[in-house]
Structure formats: C-alpha cells, structure tokens
Image (tube, grey):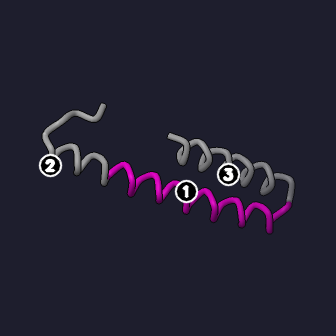
Amino acid sequence: MTLLKWAAIAFVISLVAGGLGFTGIASGASSIARILFGLFLVLAIIIVVIALAIGQAVF
C-alpha cells in the first residue's frame, strides 16, 4: 500500500506542477508516479499468483 500511496502523491504533485506551468517538475513527478505504480502492480500480481499457488488467501 505504501507504493500506491507514494505513486498517488507523485501524481498529485505532477498535476499541481503542470497546472502552475512547471513542466519540468511535472514531467519528473509523472515519471516517478508511473514507475511506482508499475512496481505496485507487479508486486501485487506476484503476491496474488503466489497466494493462488500456495492455496491460501492473502486478503
């Protein structure tokens, strides 16, 4: 959940910076948000696959 929270924070920073005209900061924050969200998705998929393979419910 922490990766998703940090991705959301970077996304909000990107939106605010883009709205104020700071395109360099918005681009950097957008890249960070995209990377963190991708890592979150990969880790979530791996955890679900492992849980299904073991046969136990993670949630």
Left or right: where 10 falls relative to 48: right
Q: CA distance from mark 3 to mark 1?
A: 9 Å
- The residue that disc 1 covers is 36
Q: Residue at x 72, y 51 (%)?
A: 15
**Given the image, on which type of amino acid does mark 3 rest?**
Ala
* Residue 10 pos. (x, y %): 67, 51
**Which picture quadrant has residue 27?**
bottom right
Residue visible at 56% across and 60% down?
34
Secondary structure of residue under mark 1 = helix
Choose between 58 and 22: the one closer to the eye.
58
Which x, y percent locates residue 13?
A: 74, 50
Considering the numbered disc 2 on the image, is that residue within a helix, a strand or a loop?
A: helix
Amino acid at pointer 2: Ala
Q: Which residue is mark 3?
A: 10
Pointer 2 residue = 53
Q: CA distance from mark 3 to mark 2?
A: 34 Å
Disc 3 + disc 2, Cβ < 8 Å:
no
Q: Mark 1 or mark 3, which is nearer the start of the sequence? A: 3
Give the x, y percent position of residue 6.
62, 47
Tell me what residue is drawn at x 80 percent, y 68 percent: 24
Kindly check if marks 3 and 1 are in contact, taking CB atoms under 8 A apart as contact.
yes
The residue mark sitting in front, 2 or 1, is 2
Q: Is residue 26 located in the magenta-colored stretch of the structure?
A: yes
Secondary structure, mark 3, is: helix
Where residue 37 sits: x, y (%)? Answer: 51, 54
Label 1 environment density (alpha carbons within 10 Å; few <14, some 14–19, many ≥20): many
Range drawn in magenta:
22-45
Q: Which of the 4 image quadrants contains residue 23?
A: bottom right
Which is the main secondary structure of the residues drawn in magenta?
helix
Residue at mark 2 to residue at mark 1: CA–CA distance: 26 Å
| Residue placed most toward the observer, 58 or 26 | 58
Amino acid, disc 1: Leu
